[in-house]
Amino acid sequence: PWKLYLPLENNIRLNQPQEMKLFNVVTDPGETANVVDRHLELVDQIKEYAEIARKDLGDTDRNGEGQRPVGRVENPVPRLSGCPCN
């Protein structure tokens, strides 16, 4: 039931420090009560999961081990679904 907001380090739209936030979306679906200070062990556990995901998927500051190259098509041709002209 937990949702953790990790602070973004390089968000160009926000010129202010961000804080980590934790919400129980079952008991607080409107995300009004940040309970990060009451559940520090849970925050550490979720941060470990996030780091595992970053290692595999990558992030803005690094490539991930499971990340594959962007797909490319040589000589692409536009196609329209259902068009008899293709």
Image: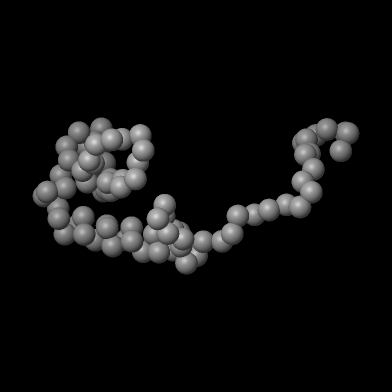
* Residue at image location 28% in from the left, 35% down from the top: 15
Residue 30, given in percent of the width and then of the height, sits at: 25, 32
Relative to 66, 49 lies left or right: left
Q: Is residue 7 left or right of residue 61?
A: left
Residue 38 sits above or below residue 25 on the image? below
Q: Residue furthest left?
A: 38
Residue 40 is left or right of residue 81, and the answer is: left
> Which residue is the extreme one toward the right?
85
Which residue does the image show at 21% across and 55% down from the upper left? 43
- Asked whether residue 6 appears in the rendered view, the answer is yes
User: Is residue 61 found left or right of 85 in the rendered image?
Assistant: left
Q: Is 74 placed above or below 31 here?
A: below
Residue 84 drawn at (x, y percent): 88, 33
Q: Position of residue 64 (x, y in %)?
A: 46, 62
The picture quadrant where one finds residue 61 is bottom left
- State which quarter of the image contains the C terminus: top right
Q: Is any part of residue 27 visible from this angle?
A: no
Residue at left offset 21%, top offset 59%: 44
Residue 6 lies, in percent from the top left, at 28, 48
The answer to which image quadrant residue 23 occupies is top left
**Residue at the bottom extreme, as displayed:** 65
Query: Between 37 and 74, which is closer to the camera in this rendering?
Result: 74
Of 38 and 28, which appears nearest the observer?
Answer: 38
What colouring style does the render use?
A: one colour
Asked which quadrant contains residue 14, the reply is: top left
